[in-house]
Image (cartoon, grey):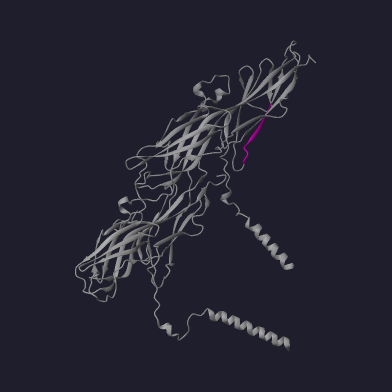
């Protein structure tokens, strides 16, 4: 009887502990007054655009002459802007001995982050393949390197509340709804980011000094330069340039330069609006858009051996 | 206790399995194109003996000479020559162990032809052959107590050195274009030989700029590391004969072929100067470069490709042994 009672107590204790585990994993409850609030997810975060990676085992570390060579690249758009009409290339090998099928390049499209793809994990793959790898006569082993390059057009959208004050140094004692101050930005879900804005506001003019930076680790390409054959035909004058458009309250600012040159990955543009804006200070959203092309790449290699006895 | 033993056994088995590598993995590739030996020669132990007795006149007291040759290089030898020379007044060659085409060389030598396969995937040591020759000593006269006679064996053959290494063809040496590169055009240091007595030791790689094109240039350094004598390849018969050799016949290596990508010396796109390397102090070099305009720098980006070099030459080795001839009458 005593043993039976002890067994039941142990069982009850176990049930309580397991229940506690389950209960602690719950978040909120049915009819929770806070469940009526809308959950918003900002996709404009992060410093990546298109991310490339080789699938594990691709390319293989080694293979024999005559073997099938497969180079499979997985790409996913970790930024907030949809990529369309991008190009994916493979290069770095000797075209006299290696012939990729169906071609050494392909077009690419990649959805950016969205409510259906909040982390940008939606990925695609492309396979560059060689039906039978060859070796030149008399060569025992050849280790070609493969460079897979992606080039695509991209856009950065940055928004921040700013204070427009037509009389920032006024001595009249009046309460202002906001004060003019510099603004720091986080990342915007793109490889080129607006990092900060310095504001100067006056009666008939407001000026924003916009700082931009290449934070994605790749190469920025001028928006007007073609991205086709970007692995061979790019010129020095085509890279490290970003086009900017800025506005607030549907007032477009004049940005100088409109195409920002980047030096060591950083650049500045001064965007100005001239004209009477308002009589009182007010809060509004500064909307900055950056347009550019971007190039990112990954490298891999394999070793091709002659067949023993062949 | 029993469970502990089972766990330990499973762990041990897991460790053993983790050390296994896949069957036929190409990572275990071992090249036969290594080393600086080609043909090796050696007398068999005791053949010839260190001491023999010189007979009286008209007496015959033969002894044997055993020579073992082995092709430890990576190329087959065909049409090589083996010469045995004895001191004319003190020894006489009676005959070879098997039926060979024998060519008399000078007054006291004989030559045969031989062929030997080199190292391969199915024979990693190279083919070996043994030759035996019967020799009879001649009388050294009544006045002498003893005489030291020389036996000399010389082998002469054609050989080939083949080398291939990946080289970077940089089509944008000054980084004018913002294209990414997969390699750097660095010199190639080669060590360990290529399975031949003449080895390529260094390839200096230079990319010379042109108008819209690049000129790859390779300075190929070679060295005779086999311990023998390099010959003009057409002179191996003369080298194993009584005919004299001139200065131009020795230390000469033909640059048979230099090739990378779709360009080669045989195709006329690559030119080597000189195309016959003259060795000095066992070393020499040649400069090979692509014809200007053949490789565009605007359409082709930097890539890695094998550079193939083939050298051909003659080679000779000599071994000798001294045999002490004791006067049988002196004892």
Give how far across and how far down residue B162 sits, in percent: 52, 37
Pick whichever, A270 or A74, lies toward us.
Answer: A270
Q: Quadrant of the C terminus of chain A?
A: top right
- Where is B121 relative to A103, above or below? above
Q: Is A138 a magenta residue?
A: no
- Where is B318 relative to A44, above or below? above
Residue, x 51% and y 36% (percent of image)?
Answer: B201
**Quarter holding residue B66:** top right
Give how far across and how far down residue B213 sits, in percent: 35, 42
Q: Left or right: A51 with respect to B320? A: left
Give how far across and how far down residue A178 sits, in percent: 29, 73
Pick whichever, B138 or A115, lies toward us.
Answer: A115
Tally the marks.
0
Q: Quadrant of the N terminus of chain A?
A: bottom right
**Quarter holding residue A288:** bottom left
Q: Is residue A67 visible?
A: yes
Residue farthest along the right direction in this orientation: B331
- Where is B22 relative to A42, above or below? above
Which stretch is magenta?
B123-132
Q: Left or right: B150 with respect to A214? A: right
Residue, x 43% and y 67% (percent of image)?
Answer: A122
Residue, x 63% and y 83% (percent of image)?
Answer: A13
Q: Is residue A137 visible?
A: no
């Amino acid at each position: 009887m005593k043993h039976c009672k002890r067994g039941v107590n142990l069982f009850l204790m176990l049930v309580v502990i397991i229940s506690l585990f389950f209960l602690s994993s719950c978040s909120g409850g049915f009819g929770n007054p806070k469940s009526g609030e809308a959950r918003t997810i900002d996709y404009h975060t992060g410093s990546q655009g298109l991310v490339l990676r080789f699938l594990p085992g691709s390319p293989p570390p080694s293979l024999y002459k005559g073997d099938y060579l497969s180079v499979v690249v997985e790409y996913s758009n970790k930024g907030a802007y949809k990529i369309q009409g991008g190009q994916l290339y493979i290069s770095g090998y000797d075209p006299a001995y290696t012939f990729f099928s169906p071609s050494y390049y392909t077009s690419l499209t990649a959805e950016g982050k969205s409510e259906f793809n909040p982390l940008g994990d939606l990925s695609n793959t492309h396979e560059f393949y060689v039906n039978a790898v060859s070796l030149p006569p008399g060569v025992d082993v050849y280790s070609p390197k493969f460079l897979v390059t992606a080039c695509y057009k991209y856009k950065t959208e940055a928004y921040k509340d700013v204070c427009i004050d037509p009389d920032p140094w006024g001595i009249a004692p009046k309460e202002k709804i906001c004060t003019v101050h510099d603004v720091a930005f986080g990342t915007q879900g793109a490889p080129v980011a607006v990092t900060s804005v310095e504001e100067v506001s006056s009666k008939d003019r407001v000026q924003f000094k916009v700082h931009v930076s290449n934070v994605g680790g790749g190469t920025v390409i001028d928006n007007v330069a073609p991205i086709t054959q970007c692995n061979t035909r790019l010129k020095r004058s085509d890279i490290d340039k970003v086009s900017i458009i800025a506005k607030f309250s549907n007032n477009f600012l004049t940005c100088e330069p409109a195409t920002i040159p980047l030096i060591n990955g950083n650049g500045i543009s001064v965007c100005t609006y001239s004209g009477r804006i308002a009589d009182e200070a007010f809060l509004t959203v500064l909307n900055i858009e950056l347009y550019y092309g971007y190039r990112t790449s990954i490298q891999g290699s394999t070793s091709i051996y002659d067949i023993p006895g062949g | 206790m029993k469970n502990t033993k089972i766990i330990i056994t499973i762990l041990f088995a897991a460790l053993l399995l983790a050390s296994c590598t896949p069957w036929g993995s190409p990572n275990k590739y071992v090249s036969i194109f290594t080393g600086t030996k080609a043909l090796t020669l050696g007398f068999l132990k005791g053949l010839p003996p260190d001491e023999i007795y010189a007979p009286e006149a008209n007496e015959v007291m033969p002894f044997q000479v055993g020579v073992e040759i082995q092709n430890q290089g990576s190329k087959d030898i065909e049409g090589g020559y083996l010469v045995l020379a004895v001191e004319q007044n003190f020894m006489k060659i009676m005959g070879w162990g098997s039926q060979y085409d024998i060519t008399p060389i000078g007054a006291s030598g004989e030559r045969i032809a031989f062929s030997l396969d080199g190292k391969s995937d199915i024979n990693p040591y190279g083919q070996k052959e043994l030759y035996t020759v019967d020799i009879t000593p001649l009388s050294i006269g009544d006045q002498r107590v003893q005489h030291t006679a020389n036996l000399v064996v010389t082998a002469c053959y054609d050989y080939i050195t083949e080398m291939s290494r990946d080289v970077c063809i940089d089509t944008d040496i000054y980084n004018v274009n913002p294209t990414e590169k997969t390699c750097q055009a660095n010199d190639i240091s080669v060590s360990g030989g290529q399975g031949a007595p003449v080895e390529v030791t260094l390839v200096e790689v230079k990319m010379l700029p042109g108008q819209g094109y690049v000129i790859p240039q390779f300075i190929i350094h070679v060295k005779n590391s086999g311990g023998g004598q390099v010959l003009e390849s057409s002179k191996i018969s003369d080298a194993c004969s009584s005919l004299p050799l001139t200065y131009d016949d020795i230390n000469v290596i033909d640059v048979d072929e230099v090739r990378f990508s779709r360009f080669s010396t045989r195709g006329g796109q690559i030119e080597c100067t000189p195309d016959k390397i003259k060795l000095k102090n066992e070393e020499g070099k040649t400069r090979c470069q692509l014809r200007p305009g053949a490789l565009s720098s605007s359409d082709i980006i930097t890539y890695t490709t094998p550079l193939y070099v083939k050298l051909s030459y003659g080679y000779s080795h000599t071994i000798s042994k001294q045999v002490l001839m004791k006067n049988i009458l002196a004892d």
